[in-house]
Amino acid sequence: MGLKVRVIPTLLWKGMGLVKGASFDSWRRVGPVLPAIKVYNRREVDELILVDIEAHAGNDDPDYRELDALGADCFVPLTFGGGITRIGQVEQLLRSGADKVSVNTAAYSEPSLIGSIAARFGAQCVVASIDARGSAETGWECFSHAGGEPTGRSPAHWARELVDRGAGEILITSIDRDGTMQGYDLALVETIVSAVDVPVIASGGAGSYDHMVAAVADAGASAVAAASIFHFTEMTPAGAKQAFEAAGLPVRQSYLEDGAD
Amino acid sequence: MRIGIVDYGIGNLGSLRRALTLMRFDAQFVTEPAALDSVDRIILPGVGNFADCAASLRLAGWDEGLRQAVSENGKPLLGICVGMQLLASHSTEGNDADRSPHGLGFIPGHVRHLRQEGSAERAPHVGWNSVEPSPSAGAIFAGIPEGTDFYFVHSYVFRPDDATHVVAQTRYGAPLPVAVRRGRVFGTQFHPEKSSRAGMRLLRNFAETPWD
């Protein structure tokens, strides 16, 4: 009962297909996008995040037509991220099947973008994404441009500012842990959870169901995002949910229709 | 059965139409109030800011068009998310002097922030949460067991003045009204079009039931 823990597969989109890397580098192709979305939709995943990891490099608009085709088979919430710099793009993205947008790089140079999107489309539509490097000992730093550029900002302060400006959720990714499957940076997640009062999605490093449970039970995340574990292992979102349930955390049950049709 | 989805320039309408089309309903976007005449049932979507949505509705004369379709022609109407909140008389969101915070007033009541409803949980309320239909909910929840999870993403809550207009509740720090009904006017705070098969069932119930 009550609000469920969300298990969110992250699909990284580069050029024509899905990829997965390690520490935001050395990308491996893992297959086409559409069949992946169809499979996740059929398995009733809680939500999907689709990120165009090349978008920040160019000044191109997102590929709305492609997104429209992808969204056609998606009846669970879809968050789109990558290269969003203007409010007009957000309107188009929402029309093309996205339910929420994730903003990362553009927020550093133009923080008011977060507020404009929230004012126009609501805070629930804005997922502010933060990529951070470092540790509890050395201190974390936010990086923009898919991990390429240091910003000098601390993730906790930046998260608070993004929420003050209107972000409805924070997606926190540890660059160091990304693709390593060694577990989320729990201290980083906990820092963000304590800094803001919006839901926090943990990302970067999930390698086992226990890692996911720890992000919620120990670090206080509302949701867990993961890519490698679902691409490269036999582990599935459904398996993760069973692990949450075994740990006493509520997860969404598949809908079973009442009575005969 | 022709289902008209009110397209007043707000939000993601594509998934709603796809869900209805997949179930073989004739779903179309209605882009001007006069075109409401050509549909049998109406869905009013909405995301974002209440005052913006309300202003957009008023600008193009949707408020009058919908009133006519519902009150005079008896067409069933389903408001989703902010579309449900717009059924209310009034909201405290976006309550600037130059923007009208009034809704359509089809179901008397008020829209307030989760905090004002006594919820101390993280806001917005995002994710899948169990929905408890009331015994009087009727056919809109047909085939949907008590406690079925639906997808929510909202910071504001519509509480009708008359408690009998609430047909389902959800707990999130406090009991929240999440589905409403008054005659042929329905509203869900959750997103059936994003709630997978359970949501499809609710949409089908709305579209197929011969409402009195």
Image (spheres, coloured by chain):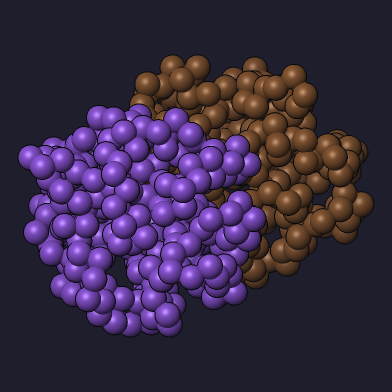
Chain colours: A purple, B brown
- The residue located at (36%, 43%) in the rendering is A170
| Front in this rendered view, residue B127 or B146 | B127
Relative to B134, is A182 above or below?
A: below
Residue drawn where x is 47% and y is 52% of the image: A106
- Give percent across and percent down for residue A163: 42, 34
Quadrant where the image shows the N terminus of chain A = top left
Does A215 appear above or below B4? above
Q: Give how far across and how far down residue B104 sits, in percent.
A: 77, 31
Residue A214 shows up from this direction: no
Give the left or right position of residue A145, taking residue A213 as reference.
Answer: right
Q: Position of residue B194 (x, y in %)?
A: 50, 55
In the depicted structure, whether residue B14 falls above or below residue B126:
below
Residue at left offset 87%, top offset 49%? B33
* Residue B25 visible at all: yes
Residue A31 position within the rendered picture, expressed as x and y whole percent measured from the top left: 33, 82
Q: Is residue A150 left or right of residue A81?
A: left
